[in-house]
Amino acid sequence: PDLIPPDYASRLAPVAVPPTLDSARTLVARAYGVAQIDALGDFPPEQAIACAMALNYVQRSQAGALPRLSRPIPQGTDGVLGIDPATRASLDILRTRDGETKHSLLGAVTRTATAAGSRLLAQWLASPLTDATAITDRQNGWLWLQSIPGLSTALGDILRRTPDPARALGRISAGRGQPRDLAAIRDTLIAANDITALFQPACDQNTPTLIRTLTAGLYGRADTLLEQLQAAVAETLPARIEDGGFIAPGYNTELDRYRGLRDESRRIIAAMQGELSEKFGVSNLKIKHHAQLGYVIEVPPAAGTKLRDNPELSFRQGTASLARFSTEELASLDRAILEAADKASALERRIFAELCARILQTPALDEVAEFLALADVLRSCGLLAEGGSWCRPTVTDGTEFSLVACRHPVVEAALAESGSADARFIPNDCALPPEHRAMLLTGPNMAGKSTFLRQTALAVILAQAGLPVPAKSAHIGVVDRLFSRVGGADDLARGRSTFMVEMTETAAILNQAGPKSLVVVDEIGRGTATLDGLSIAWATLEALHTQLGSRTIFATHFHELGALTEFLPRLAPYTMAVKEWRGEVIFQHEVRPGAARKSWGLHVAKLAGIPQSVVNRASRLLTQFEREQADSRSSLPLFEAVAEPEIPPAPELAAPPIRTPLEDAIRALNPDDLSPRDALDALYELKRLASGNGT
């Protein structure tokens, strides 16, 4: 986007958040130096107000001065994978629920060398694409880097010595720039030229479009500014402007002259000290600088008594250990040195301001910073794919969905970090083809259902962000909306219980999901009574399968839902593999076709540390309940009806229906033709027939 003039910050005074649309539009127009906000683009009322609020917040946070900002651009949600807040929280995309990034998806996949690259990678993961062509362009970019030997390594060396230009630009535009920010811009432009020189020999007609665009975006974009900064900025820089010395010698002759006088003062003072010592016959005479007196002659008290009567000296101060004198020549030199230092400092500050203004007037810097970040992200993606355990996913516009030997990147990284020889992640396949687009997943807790759900959702995010996927192969039809409801939590601050949160999130899924969506849900209905929860889970699964047609993984402990696989043609049953061995239960963390026979809840309770006496009592109660259920055969009439559905006779074989007098009387009524009295009489007649009289 076109950059606004660097002096626009003074056009806007701090104001409160605009309460009306008119004031918001005026505020934005004034901030960007235009008569009407329409000159910036077509912004709906809510966007204009949001932009004004953002500008107001930034200005107040920057002590009334707006930093250098690009013109507002309507972003929209077209072409971006829809991920609601509940799904983002469930998947820990950028940070975990406790605010850490280490065990997030971003923390597991980042291999970036710069802060700007890390920010861009976070942006890719937070807003995956839905355009298969754009996704393929990103993939081709990192595959090209990976395919040329040594290119990624050389690029990493350049990037690691590249500063963060965005932060330097921000400080300069806010009036808080320091000498090292000038060096950051200089080194950024040097890095851009180095990357161009690295890429150009490897580019040909087969080079991916993204790489050609990146190379063109870095080539010679601000060479004139670079030459000026290389000449002006010293190699060794102080942390603050006040310390001085950040403009290189030879850049400004006047500055060099002032510095010469200032820096030569030591030699001049030393020579004068020798002359005065010999002249007055005091071998230990010293010339030193005093904070209040300036440059003075210091001699011992005995010599000071002799020199007090000398007309060439002016007595300035005496102490028990020394006497201080001054001369007209020494006072003149002090003034000259002081003026030279002040003039050098003022001129150096003026040169710094000119360089900052020149930087802010160079719009190419923003694009250079963006392309450097892009190069870093593409290199990071290539590093992920180098080991061979991550694949390039095939992303199409269809509805197919297949992951072979897929893994959870965050869990896998944590296991690798643990250093345990036995810590090995068990990969799993996931197939949701159009003919079986819904998966019913059963199995016990601790067997890996939640991990399987999350790794499938994360594979979609990685694939549509343009990154490699931790699997042997992946074939994904573009997902337009991703929904993940795994785990339970309350929101007591808003007056919502765990079950209310669960139902709210389920409602959001049922109201927004469609045929191109992916839904991964766990334990729908478990937050309420058994029959209530079972009914909700049943109806939700039916809606996802039949009405919405979404690609779905529906994990549940309601094993009775397995009966639905006989009546929902696109529902396939899967379960987490469990093995019993010598009285112990071994969770194999594998997803296999079939349905679980039981929940293994008592075993999990034992693993969690429930006292053995309680586990034994629960086991006896479970046996009793199962026996009573088997005897009564009345545990779940709903599912008994499903297991043995009543099939009506074919029309040609059905016997003629026998109608009762009550049915005949109802059919004969025409409510629109009845008067109030006739209607009352008809009601009495129907009551008589219903009670058995006349049937």
Image: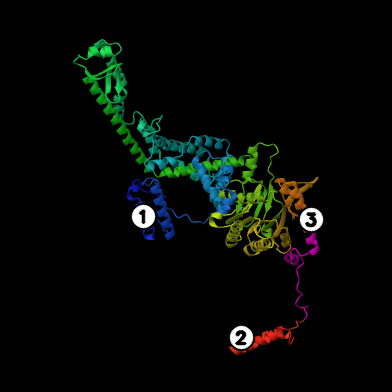
In the drawing, what numbered circle is on residue 267?
Answer: none
* Residue plotted at (58% across, 62% down): 511
* Residue plotted at (30% across, 33% down): 347
Q: Badge 3: how crowded within 10 Å, few (<14), some, or many (20+)? A: few
Q: Give, as a three-letter code, the residue at label 3.
A: Thr
* Residue plotted at (51% across, 42% down): 117
Mark 2 residue element: helix
Q: Which residues are magenta?
A: 626-655
Q: Give, as a three-letter code, the residue at label 2.
A: Pro
User: What's the CA distance linking mark 3 and mark 2?
Assistant: 58 Å
Dot placed on the residue nearer the N-terminal end, 3 or 2: 3
Q: Mark 2 and mark 3 in contact (Cβ < 8 Å)?
A: no
Q: Quadrant for the C terminus, please.
A: bottom right
User: What's the CA distance linking mark 3 and mark 1?
Assistant: 72 Å
The residue singled out by tag 1 in the image is 27
Q: Badge 2: how crowded within 10 Å, few (<14), some, or many (20+)? A: few
Q: Give, as a three-letter code, the residue at label 1.
A: Leu
- Choose between 339 and 162: the one closer to the eye: 339
The residue singled out by tag 3 in the image is 623
Describe residue 610's horizontal placement relative to residue 297 as left or right.
Answer: right
Q: Position of residue 625 (x, y in %)?
A: 77, 58
- Choose between 85 and 570: the one closer to the eye: 85
Q: Badge 1: how crowded within 10 Å, few (<14), some, or many (20+)? A: many
- The chosen color scheme is rainbow
Residue farthest to the left, as pictured: 311
Describe residue 122's horizontal placement relative to residue 342 as left or right.
Answer: right
In which quadrant of the rendered view does residue 232 lie? top left
- Choose between 474 and 183: the one closer to the eye: 183
Dot placed on the residue nearer the N-terminal end, 3 or 1: 1
Q: Position of residue 99 (x, y in %)?
A: 54, 45
